[in-house]
Image (cartoon, coloured by chain):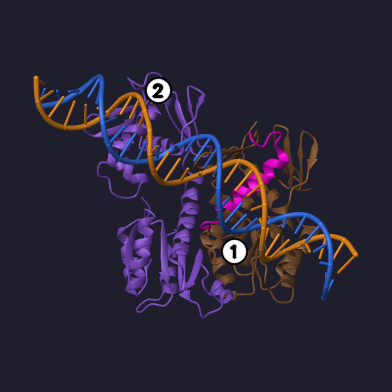
Chain colours: A brown, B purple, C blue, D orange
Amino acid sequence: MYKVLVCDDDRAILDSVGIYLEAEGYAVLKASDGAEALEALRENEVQCVVLDVMMPRMDGLTAMLKMRDKYNFPIILLSAKSEDTDKIAGLSFGADDYVTKPFNPLELTARVKSQIRRYVSLGSMEHKDSVLTTGGLSLDRDTKAVTVDGEPVKLTAREYSILCYLMENMGRVLSSSQIYEAFWNEPSFGTEKTVTVHVRNIREKIEINPKDPKYLKVVWGLGYKVEKY
Amino acid sequence: MYKVLVCDDDRAILDSVGIYLEAEGYAVLKASDGAEALEALRENEVQCVVLDVMMPRMDGLTAMLKMRDKYNFPIILLSAKSEDTDKIAGLSFGADDYVTKPFNPLELTARVKSQIRRYVSLGSMEHKDSVLTTGGLSLDRDTKAVTVDGEPVKLTAREYSILCYLMENMGRVLSSSQIYEAFWNEPSFGTEKTVTVHVRNIREKIEINPKDPKYLKVVWGLGYKVEKY
DNA sequence: TTTTTTCCTTACCGAATCCCAAATCTTTTT
DNA sequence: AAAAAGATTTGGGATTCGGTAAGGAAAAAA
């Protein structure tokens, strides 16, 4: 039976999440701050951790960094929508997934399930491929380095995030609002144009001829995609 | 067509939200308290619920918990602005999003749209195959790619949606007005002719001989269908 | 801290593309 | 043969995308 550690200072959330996860057949350990969580980990082998960002004594991000020193199980962060400390900031610090409050407990359960499946199927193999490639374009999610035909390309944070998202969904068409919502955690009304400007800037950097893009293509009326070669 | 249940004791809000959602092409069910909402859910399959927190008889949070026992559609809470957002985030455990009153109806609409998109795409991720096929014709809903005998075909956005709709209902006959209303939410007087034109353009692209269509056939006096092979 | 630099967002215009409706022609049904 | 339904063609109008630029925010440097 797989074990999941849930860490949140709100007991109501702790209990309810526990109920949902137990219904899925997981054993649930509970902690109400980072210190308690680390202590629980010393005595138990878990396959996944759900961690609130805002907690007394030791906050979630600090706790996560300490966990990463010793363990490599997946970590899912919880945070209130209002704090909005960028999704990317959280993920790039070593989290595997990120859920904003309020959240659907069923969705959290689904994410836990999917993280555990990935974790155990990799069988503690450290070899998750962090490099995405198509044709001469490649992106390394560990080093955040992007190269075209071996030449390094300097992208800004937003540009990197957008390109990364598109390459993780290689071949799939994503609408401007989908892309927008993936990073701003906000539905878009009228702000989709921002995405097109970023797309243009990305093309300027990674395409030989931005007018006739080879990698980052538009699908009229539907969205953008990265071509799979 | 997706259905949204809106629940609020203020009839003015109920009506205005209803108008905006209907303009977006959703079917709207209305309820004025939690009990009514639960009853409506027994008789209808909905894809999203908008729920006021403060209501007589049965309040929103209680209603939400009861809904979570049986359903897993997204729930969006409405709450008074007075409480601070972090507090709401904590209290509203189990919701997928929240909006504070007073609110911009367009914002609420955008959030509903975004939740429904996530909900239906998650559903199709698990079970349904994203590729529809009949004979040599195939359509991939992820990449939005259509091929005939392996050859890629370039369709416009509207052509794609119409073909997709027909292929999702493979073998079934759909009238022009049905097809029209599926995308252009609302009337269909004289406008069915437009569908005819699109059908012709689609045939031009996917049929060997558009005069004697193999896939996209007409059923005289009733409508169109995609032949199942 | 203040200054400097880089980056993000928004607005606008032009160009490419597509949608729609009307008019006309063809096929099917009665 | 007449009537009804679908097929085809065409042009104006609406959308969507690309490109540019400027103001403001954020990050980096001093």
Q: Which mark is residue B207?
A: 2
Chain letter, disc 1 residue: A
Q: Which residue lies furthest to the bottom in this view?
A: B82
Seen from the viewer's position, the closer of residues B60 and B180 is B180
- Residue type of the residue flagged with mark 2: Glu
Q: Can residue A10 be seen in this view?
A: yes
What residue do we see at 70% from left, 49% from top? A160
Find out whether the residues at labels 2 and 1 contact each other: C-beta distance under 8 Å.
Answer: no
> In the image, residue A187 lies at what x, y percent?
53, 59
Q: Is residue A132 visible?
A: no
In terms of secondary structure, where does tag 1 sit? strand
Magenta range: A188-212
Q: Name the residue under label 1.
A: A100
Magenta-colored segment: predominant secondary structure: helix
Neighbour class for label 1 at 10 Å: few (<14), some, many (≥20)? many
> In the image, residue A108 lies at what x, y percent?
57, 59
Q: Is residue A178 left or right of residue B176?
A: right
**In the rendered image of this protein, does residue A110 appear above or below residue B80?**
above
Q: Is residue B158 left or right of residue B212?
A: right
